[in-house]
Image (tube, grey):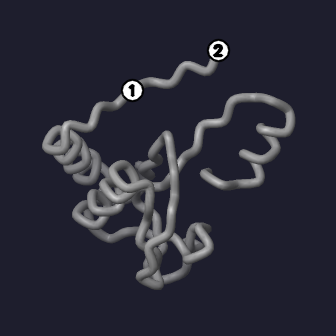
């Protein structure tokens, strides 16, 4: 996850780290994820997911559960496959990427 202890540990020992953000999860004002049992922890529709993804990709920011806009830079997006809206979210993200001419690329850290 972006801005995590894992990222700091990777930097300390000089190994590459890919910053990840969550397309379908709610964030707090401190940049941490809401716990799964909290209201808003999982975004309820593919429309919300696409809005969050576009904020992350185009503006390097996210709107928190408190309705604050905070910076969040990520190189990778996670979408949980166990949500009922996962497929619709992925399809909507693909359409949004095409509309905004956002290119996807694979990572190579070797």
Tell me residue 8's x, y (percent): 78, 47
| 3D distance between C-alphas at marks 1 and 2 | 15 Å
- The residue at which mark 2 appears reads as 110
Q: Is residue 88 left or right of residue 56?
A: left
| SS at badge 1 | loop
Tell me residue 90's x, y (percent): 28, 46
Using the image, determine if residue 108 lies above or below residue 84. Answer: above
Q: Is residue 93 left or right of residue 40?
A: left
- The residue at which mark 1 appears reads as 105
Q: Residue furthest right?
A: 13
Q: Residue furthest top?
A: 110
Quarter holding the C terminus? Answer: top right
| SS at badge 2 | loop
Q: Residue furthest left?
A: 99
Q: Are marks 1 and 2 in contact (CB under 8 Å)?
A: no
Give the camera-side residue of 93 and 38.
Answer: 93
Q: Identify the residue at horizontal 35%, vertical 61% (top origin).
A: 52
Q: Identify the residue at horizontal 44%, vertical 61% (top origin).
A: 61
Q: Is residue 77 left or right of residue 87?
A: right
Tell me residue 65's x, y (percent): 46, 80
Give the camera-side residue of 98 and 60.
Answer: 60
Residue 105 figure quarter: top left
Give the class, few, some or many, for how many residues have Cα within 10 Å of label 2's Cα (few <14, many ≥20).
few
Give the class, few, some or many, for how many residues have Cα within 10 Å of label 1's Cα (few <14, many ≥20).
few
Q: Earlier in the sequence, mark 1 or mark 2?
A: 1
Using the image, determine if residue 64 lies above or below residue 83. Answer: below
Tell me residue 14's x, y (percent): 80, 30
Residue 50 figure quarter: bottom left
Q: Identify the residue at horizontal 85%, vertical 39% (top origin).
A: 12
């Amino acid at each position: 996850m972006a801005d995590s202890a894992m990222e700091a540990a990777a930097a300390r020992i000089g190994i590459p780290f890919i910053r990840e953000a969550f397309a379908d999860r709610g964030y707090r004002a401190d940049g941490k994820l809401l716990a799964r049992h909290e209201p808003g922890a999982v975004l309820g529709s593919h429309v919300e997911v696409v809005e969050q993804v576009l904020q992350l990709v185009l503006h390097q920011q996210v709107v928190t559960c408190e309705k604050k806009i905070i910076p969040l830079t990520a190189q990778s997006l996670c979408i949980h496959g166990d949500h009922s809206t996962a497929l619709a979210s992925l399809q909507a993200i693909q359409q949004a990427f095409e509309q905004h001419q956002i290119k996807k690329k694979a990572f190579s850290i070797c």
